[in-house]
Image (tube, grey):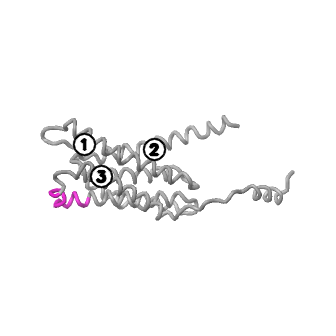
Amino acid sequence: MIKTSHLIEALAADARPVRRLRPPVLRAALWLLLAALIFGLLAVGHGVRPDLAQRLEQPDFIVGTAAALLTGVLAAVASFMLNLPDRSRGWALLPVPALLVWMATLGYGCLVNWVSIGPYGVQVGETARCFATVLMTSLPLSLAMLAMLRHGAVLSASTVSLTGSLAVAAITATAMSIFHSLDASVMILVWNLGTAVLIVALGRWLGPRLAAAGR
């Protein structure tokens, strides 16, 4: 039997320096900076929606867009906070008030018709541009979030995944509100959060089986 002191000395001798993670708020700020860069590229390459000036005169649009953006910011902060093992699980509640306001502004029509259409229907070209915007916004943000969270010691992976996915969904919905007339907020939420729930469920189902197979 190896004595505990000898085991500690052996482990310490082979230990490598651990690079400290940047503060959670700073990591969230860097991720949001990427989101701002994507918004800038979309503005240059695509331009804002033609009726943005008129929509900005409508209080429900301003409140809804601001609530979506705030949800994304707070969810990103919560995700990076929860990525550290010494932080309270209560950080998961940080984006909830903004999320409730955002959900309240969606309205019944958006919940029934996930993508609102004009009097002449959805044109193929606009639908393709809408999908491209969703993809160009959500894909790099999701990959960046995954890369920035993978170094943390996660005690509650499901909560981190859900808050991170909520951040991506909220920022993507904000982009849609600014650059497109199609209202796909609910669809974007279901897409991102549904994917996160599926990954968490698969992880919980496969985890014990992989561990048992490796014994």
- Report which residue position mark 3 lands on: 175
- Report which residue position mark 1 lands on: 115
**Circle 3: is it few (<14), some (14-19), or many (20+) Cα within 10 Å?**
many
Residue that lies at the very extreme toward the left in this rendered image: 119
Q: Secondary structure at mark 3?
A: helix
Spatial CA span between label 2 and label 3: 23 Å
First in sequence: mark 2 vs mark 3: 3
| Image location (x, y in percent) of residue 92 | 46, 58
**In the image, is residue 56 part of the stretch drawn in magenta?**
yes
Q: Residue at x 58, y 59 (%)?
A: 85
| Image location (x, y in percent) of residue 68 | 32, 56
| Foreground pick, 139 / 184 | 139
Q: Relative to residue 77, is residue 150 depicted above or below?
A: above
Spatial CA span between label 3 and label 1: 15 Å
Evaluate if marks 3 and 1 touch, with contact meaning CB atoms under 8 Å apart: no
Which mark is nearer the camera, 3 or 1?
3
Q: Residue at x 31, y 52 (%)?
A: 41
Type of amino acid at the residue the image marks with label 3: Ala
First in sequence: mark 2 vs mark 1: 1
Q: Which residues are magenta?
A: 53-63
